[in-house]
Image (spheres, rainbow, N blue to C red):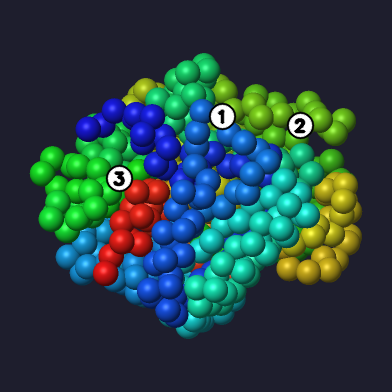
């Protein structure tokens, strides 16, 4: 049941297993199914064309994937007894009063201010993720997909462009996409030397064992309800969720100029400015980790690195190199989780909360060089940010846990009044002094330094919870009468 077979390999949509690094251009189309019979016919037509991971990946072919919201599955006629078996976070959706507090979607981040998603905008049924090697290939792929959508009377309610920035950087100017888990049983696992970073497949894909040595719950149907025998078996049932994954999609606006101006105001000179920003991020702009290079960026000559082989407990337990409250350290505490004194146990616990990121930048940067001094002085010509996408086997224990417990929590690892300096939001509390704002602590010996009144450098401007089903599940959807 839990063996990762070649059949499973071909059944999982490609975006779950890898990020299409060769496809530099992307576009996300938010869809509404207005004609259900034609929508199902379209799904039946594209099912075999959807990109998935195969032994030999043809990098020239059209690349696209699709994920659905709970409302999208409802619209397509998935029976209520199947719908009710999805995780309740997915059923409720990303915009509820409780979830707004958990995720920090308050104030500027509140859903009523979003460009799309949530209860204040048009209902989203699905997202079609379209990719191309370059702009020309993307345009051709997009045109073909839109033609099919129009013929199926599927409404495109919102479009979002995505780009790849130089050297895989994000808009603040730091190399991104480095700290990704390696999935057990995949080709990358066989060539990976860092065993601490290997995470069981079930943490991200339904139908397989997770880090608890359990298989996550999954929507099941009776064999009699799968007359065409499309879905795989799970004991005496058919498994609609197997080889699928919960997908979080959030549009995060980055206030780049404000970010670098704050660093400049707190520093004396460009060198100190970059070092403070690096303290908040946890890596130098090149991607070099602070815990291994605390004094200077070893690649400040324009080179970059994907170095992710390090821990904190032995070399930097007190955060004197990489601050305990830095974004890197909070989003993945590795072997130094404060809840345990054992490095191996810490790694095990952290790996139960990992997420698999597949996001991309949007908006043209204000500087082609991505140098801090230019990002600070050049005003952006358009909104810039990140289309944050991640995959989870369980929304509550992975994405929501990381966002609430590690990023937003002001008392993370013994800190005080210090949410994540990049993505954290200080949750209002009746006992809190209304004059208190976000702070960031740089640990030192004998004295630590606190930076106060940190602006909100990143704002949430859109979001939804999706489920990216397997190819067989899509075929089953299309077969429903």
Give how far apart the Cα atoms at labels 3 and 2 are.
Answer: 38 Å
Label pair 3/1, CB-CB below 8 angstroms? no
Given residues 111 and 478, the one toward you in this image is: 478
Label pair 2/1, CB-CB below 8 angstroms? no
Q: Which residue is mark 3?
A: 242
- Whether residue 437 is visible, yes or no, is no
Q: Position of residue 206 (x, y in %)?
A: 31, 44
Q: Which residue is mark 1?
A: 56
Residue 336, disc: none
Give how far apart the Cα atoms at labels 3 and 1 are.
Answer: 23 Å
First of labels 3, 2 by sequence position:
3
Q: Secondary structure at mark 2?
A: loop
Label pair 3/2, CB-CB below 8 angstroms? no
Which marked residue is nearer to the observer: mark 3 or mark 2? Answer: 3
Graded by Cα atoms within 10 Å as few (under 14), some (14 to 19) or many (20 or more), the crowding at tag 1 reads: few
Quadrant (top left/top right/bottom left/bottom right) for the N terminus: top left
Give how far apart the Cα atoms at labels 2 and 1 are.
Answer: 29 Å
Direction from residue 395 to residue 164 in the image, left or right:
right
Direction from residue 365 to residue 109 in the image, left or right:
left
Q: Secondary structure at mark 1?
A: loop
Given residues 15 and 472, the one toward you in this image is: 472
């Amino acid at each position: 049941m839990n063996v990762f077979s070649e059949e499973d390999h071909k059944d999982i949509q490609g975006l779950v297993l890898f990020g299409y690094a060769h496809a530099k251009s992307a576009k996300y189309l938010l869809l509404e199914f207005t004609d259900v019979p034609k929508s199902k016919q379209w799904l039946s037509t594209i099912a075999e064309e959807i990109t998935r991971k195969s032994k030999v990946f043809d990098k020239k072919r059209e690349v696209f994937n699709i994920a659905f919201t709970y409302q999208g599955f409802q619209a397509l006629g998935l029976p209520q007894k199947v719908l009710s078996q999805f995780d309740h976070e997915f059923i409720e959706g990303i915009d509820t009063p409780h979830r707004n507090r958990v995720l920090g979607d308050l104030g500027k981040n509140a859903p009523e201010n979003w460009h799309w998603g949530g209860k204040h905008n048009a209902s989203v049924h699905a997202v079609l993720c379209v990719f191309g090697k370059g702009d020309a290939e993307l345009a051709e792929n997009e045109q073909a997909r839109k033609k099919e959508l129009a013929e199926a009377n599927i409404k495109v309610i919102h479009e979002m462009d995505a780009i790849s920035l130089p050297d895989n950087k994000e808009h603040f100017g730091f190399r991104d996409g480095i700290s990704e888990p390696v999935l057990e049983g995949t080709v990358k696992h066989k060539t990976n030397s860092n065993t601490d970073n290997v995470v069981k497949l079930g943490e991200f894909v339904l139908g397989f064992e997770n880090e608890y040595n359990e298989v996550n719950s999954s929507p099941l149907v009776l064999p009699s309800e799968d007359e065409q025998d499309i879905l795989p078996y799970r004991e005496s049932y058919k498994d609609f969720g197997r080889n699928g994954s919960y997908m979080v999609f959030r549009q995060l606006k980055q206030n780049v100029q404000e970010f670098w101006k704050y660093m400049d105001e707190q520093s004396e000179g460009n060198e100190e400015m970059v070092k403070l920003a690096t303290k908040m991020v946890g890596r130098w702009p090149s991607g070099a980790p602070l815990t291994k290079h605390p004094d200077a960026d070893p690649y400040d000559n324009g080179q970059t690195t994907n170095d992710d082989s390090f821990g904190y407990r032995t070399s930097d337990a007190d955060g004197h190199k990489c601050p305990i409250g830095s974004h890197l350290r909070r989003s993945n505490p590795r072997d130094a989780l404060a809840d345990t004194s054992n490095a191996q146990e810490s790694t095990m616990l952290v790996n139960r909360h990992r997420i698999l990121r597949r996001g991309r930048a949007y908006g043209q940067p204000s500087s082609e060089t991505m140098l801090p001094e230019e990002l600070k002085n050049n005003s952006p010509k358009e909104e810039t940010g990140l289309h944050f996408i991640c995959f989870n086997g369980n929304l509550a224990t992975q994405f929501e846990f990381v966002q609430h417990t590690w990023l937003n929590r002001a008392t993370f690892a013994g800190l005080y009044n210090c949410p994540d300096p990049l993505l954290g939001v200080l949750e209002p509390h009746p006992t809190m002094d209304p004059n208190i704002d976000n702070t960031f602590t740089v640990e030192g010996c004998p004295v630590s330094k606190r930076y106060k009144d940190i602006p909100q450098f990143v704002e949430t401007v859109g979001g939804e919870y999706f489920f990216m089903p397997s190819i067989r599940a899509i075929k089953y959807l299309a077969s429903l009468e």
